[in-house]
Amino acid sequence: MLALLLAVVVFVVLGLVLMPLLRARAAGLASEHYDRVVYRDQLRELDRDRARGVLSDAEAASARLEVQRRLLATTAAPSRAARAGASPIVAALVASIMAGGSIGLYLRIGAPAMPDMPFASRTADPRVEAVAQALVRLKQRTETEPGNAEAWLEYARAMAEVNQWAPAADALKRAIDLGQNSPETLSAFGEMLTLSARGTVVPAAREAFAAALTKDPSLATARYYSALAAGQDGDSAKAIAMLQALAADIPADSPERADIANRIAEAAKASGVPVPALADGKPPTPRQSDTQQQAMIRGMVDGLASRMATNPNDLDGWLKLGRAYGVLNETAKAADAYKHAMALKPGDPAILQQAAQAMLANQPATAPVPAEAVDVLKQIEALTPGQPTVMWYLGLAAAQIGKPAEARQYWGRLIASLPPDGEEAKTIKAAMDALRDK
């Protein structure tokens, strides 16, 4: 089919190119004909000028004699140029060059021997497929665990990575409503709103940045967008001052300084003032070795732990400490921090979820599910039933203590919520079959 279409295109193009060469053309009138037309018009113009009084009789007579002299100098009869005949030899030569050149060029740089690849058999980029599958899994997790703030945060981060600003903002709003109102989360929510509005700092974004700066006045992202908001309100002087203060507070080698300088130049141009020199930044932070970085992190975590010992009613502090210990892979300490958080806010699904994740982190596949984790998982199941991870571990715990009927009940509900042909469903079905053999 492709070869036929290409052949039709070639014939059409050749026809358009060769048609003028294969058809005889009549030549136009000779130039003397047009000269006579011009001279006759000049004679009529002389008569009109004389009638209007523009020319005197003597002037009109003199001009008429000159025009008549030129008119008589042309030939008496209209002559025609010779007819232009057809050029079949030239046409054949052009056709040969075009056809031969096209075929030769295709044989040289084309791939005529390569078979066609049907659309159905084409495989997509595996990296793109992996990202798409990860997004689907994260979305499914938010649907099955709507009360899990961490799930919404992970989904928001993933959507931001693929420049889906509006869905990321929606996910961050859900996480904030579930209690994730740290300055960083609030600022990220405002940034996603701004990006989804094509750079306009909308009212909801301004409120988010203001709330973030109330908790952490040094937060660079919130300060940057607050300065942009001032510029969009027409207060260029305030925008420049805020951006200069931000530039002074970040390291001199920070790549963000170039964007800050551009924004200052835009604000200065809008207000008609000279562009000021960018404020000097802080000295560049010296590079640290891995050992130094670990020591710094350890010092921060130990400092937070000491603060919590003297302020045990700080819910956000216990949650931060639990996450910090999780990063350090100290699961026992992370679980203990989350226990304090659960005591301060009992029955909170998001806190329970984080506690369960800490208790099950780095758990070997064959190791028994800890009893304290089972207790937390059952609380989650009672508050937000149907979460796949919860049903899997509760079924696993039941199977490990010799309760196959209870395990099949959990896993049966789980497998009903999964695609029947997926790998997860196959794994669960194999586990249920193993229970029947016992």
Image (tube, rainbow, N blue to C red):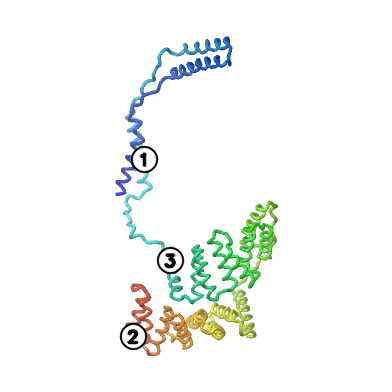
Q: Of residues 18 and 160, which is closer to you in this image? A: 160
- First along the sequence among labels 3 and 2: 3
Residue 431 spot, x, y in % from top left: 35, 82
Q: Could you say which disc has been placed on residue 435 in the image?
A: 2
Residue 130 is labelled as none
Q: Tell me which label, 1 or 3, sits earlier in the chain.
A: 1
Residues packed near mark 1 inside 10 Å, few (<14), some (14 to 19) or many (20 plus): few
Residue 87, compared with residue 292, is above or below; it is above
- For badge 3, the amino acid type reads Ala
- What residue is drawn where x is 56% and y is 68%? 188
Q: Nearer the viewer, mark 1 or mark 3?
A: 3
Height in image: 41 above or below 248? above
Amino acid residing under circle 2: Leu
Q: Amino acid at mark 1?
A: Gly
Looking at the image, tell me whether mark 2 or mark 1 is earlier in sequence order: 1
Residue 59: tell me if it is visible. yes
Q: Secondary structure at mark 1?
A: helix
Q: What residue sits right under mark 3 in the picture?
A: 132
Which residue is most to the bottom? Answer: 402
- Give the number of the mark in front: 2 or 1: 2
Residue 240 placement: quadrant:
bottom right
Mark yes or no: residue 258 visible: no
The x and y percentages for residue 145 are 45, 76
* Nearer the observer, 41 or 92: 41
Secondary structure under the numbered disc 3 in the rendered image: helix
Circle on res. 101: 1
Q: Is residue 27 left or right of residue 44?
A: left
Query: What residue do we see at 65% from left, 55% from top?
Result: 267
Task: Give residue 195's position: percent from left, percent from top.
Answer: 54, 61
